[in-house]
Image: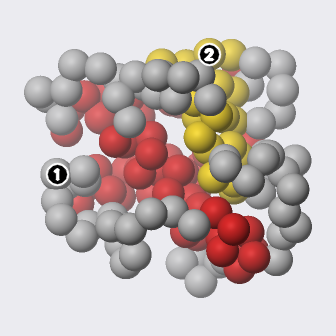
């Protein structure tokens, strides 16, 4: 995916969420489990002092959800179906969506994220604005 794609900021935000949120729950189709596991192993190699890592839960639904470990709420979703506004949404199919998320996560790990300042890209230090993200993608809101 090119950085000029209007979905790029959502991809980057989901990749950063995956990398920085300890004990995050990744929920997705069964084919995704081993692929997520590979990225978790890589995360452990890059951040050896880390003790809590994302986990994977299989679902029959054709979407990828990132859930908060503290309250169980979905914080990010990759799907063609639009989630509520409080969820970071990547409007893509699961295979292409995860390919984009994991590629950006790998690039961020190579750059030293989350221990590096500014390597998450421009506008990464502020609060995420989901309404603007959806507007830039030309997607409706609920």
Residue 7 visible from this viewpoint: no
Q: Is residue 41 left or right of residue 116?
A: right
Dot 1, how many residues are within 10 Å of its Cα: few (below 14), some (14-19), or many (20+)? few
Which residue appears at 69% of the width and 27% of the height?
A: 28
Disc 1: which residue? 115
Q: Is residue 90 left or right of residue 24?
A: right
Residue 81 point in image, percent of width and height: 87, 47
In the picture, the disc for residue 106 is none
Residue 70 point in image, percent of width and height: 46, 22
Which residue appears at 84% of the width and 26% of the height?
A: 61
**Quarter containing the C terminus:** bottom right
**Quarter containing the N terminus:** bottom right
Disc 2: which residue? 57
Label 1 secondary element: loop
CA separation in Å, label 2 and label 1: 27 Å
Residue 133 point in image, percent of width and height: 65, 70
Which residue appears at 12% of the width and 27% of the height?
A: 49
Residue 8 point in image, percent of width and height: 58, 69
Q: Is residue 135 above or below residue 115?
A: below
Q: Is residue 122 left or right of residue 141?
A: left
């Amino acid at each position: 995916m090119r950085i000029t794609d209007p979905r790029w900021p959502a991809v980057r935000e989901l990749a950063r969420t995956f990398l920085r949120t300890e004990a995050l729950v990744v929920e997705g189709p069964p084919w995704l489990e081993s692929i997520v596991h590979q990225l978790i192993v890589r995360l452990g190699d890059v951040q050896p002092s880390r003790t809590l890592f994302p986990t994977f839960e299989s679902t029959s639904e054709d979407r990828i959800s990132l859930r908060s470990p503290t309250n169980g709420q979905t914080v990010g979703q990759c799907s063609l179906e639009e989630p509520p506004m409080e969820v970071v949404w990547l409007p893509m199919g699961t295979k292409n969506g995860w390919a984009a998320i994991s590629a950006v996560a790998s690039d961020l790990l190579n750059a030293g994220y989350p221990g590096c300042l500014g390597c998450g890209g421009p506008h990464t230090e502020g609060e995420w604005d989901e309404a603007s993200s959806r507007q830039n993608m030309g997607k409706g809101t609920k």
